[in-house]
Amino acid sequence: MSKLYLLLAALLGGSGVILGAFGAHGLRGKVADNLLEAYKTGVHYQLVHALALIGVAVLIQQWGERTALAVCGALFFVGVLFFSGSLYGLTFGGPRWLGPVTPLGGLLMIGGWVALFIAALNLSK
């Protein structure tokens, strides 16, 4: 599981840098300011959660395979796909149904942090 989360973190991190550079250099003046801000928010959350996934992978190495950590990593990854992905889609004129997907992704990421909290609570067990 640790290797998988490191691979996913590298994928999110690398693509986050690419998407951030594209947004800074390729989108300015081409999309509305509010859409550019939403795009930047998607990149920011993607990069933050790429780092968080690295942390989860390290914790799995330190603490061993724990259900709460596995859930945490999965929620972080899927949360980024939903949250950031929906913001990217909306920026490029995607369907309006992507709008409600954004907060769902946010809830998934919050759930990941709750799972990390639970893993920490159960550490001594």
Image: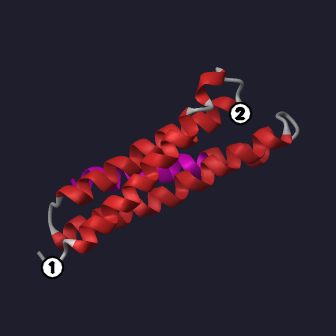
Residue 59 location, quadrant: bottom left
9 magenta-colored? yes
Residue that carries the numbered disc 1 in the rendered image: 124
**Could one spot residue 96 in this view of the protein?**
yes
Q: Residues within 10 Å of mark 1 (few under 14, many from 20)?
A: few
Residue 45, given in percent of the width and then of the height, sits at: 56, 54
Residue 37, given in percent of the width and then of the height, sits at: 76, 47
Q: Is residue 14 left or right of residue 116?
A: right
The stretch of residues the image draws in magenta is: 1-18
- For badge 2, the amino acid type reads Thr
**Could one spot residue 26 in this view of the protein?**
no
Residue at point 22% right, 65% down? 60
Residue at point 25% right, 67% down? 119
The answer for how far apart the CA atoms under marks 1 and 2 are is 45 Å
Residue that carries the numbered disc 2 in the rendered image: 91
Q: Is residue 32 left or right of residue 8?
A: right
Residue at point 32% right, 47% down? 74
118 magenta-colored? no
Front position in the image: 100 or 87: 100
Front position in the image: 102 or 4: 102
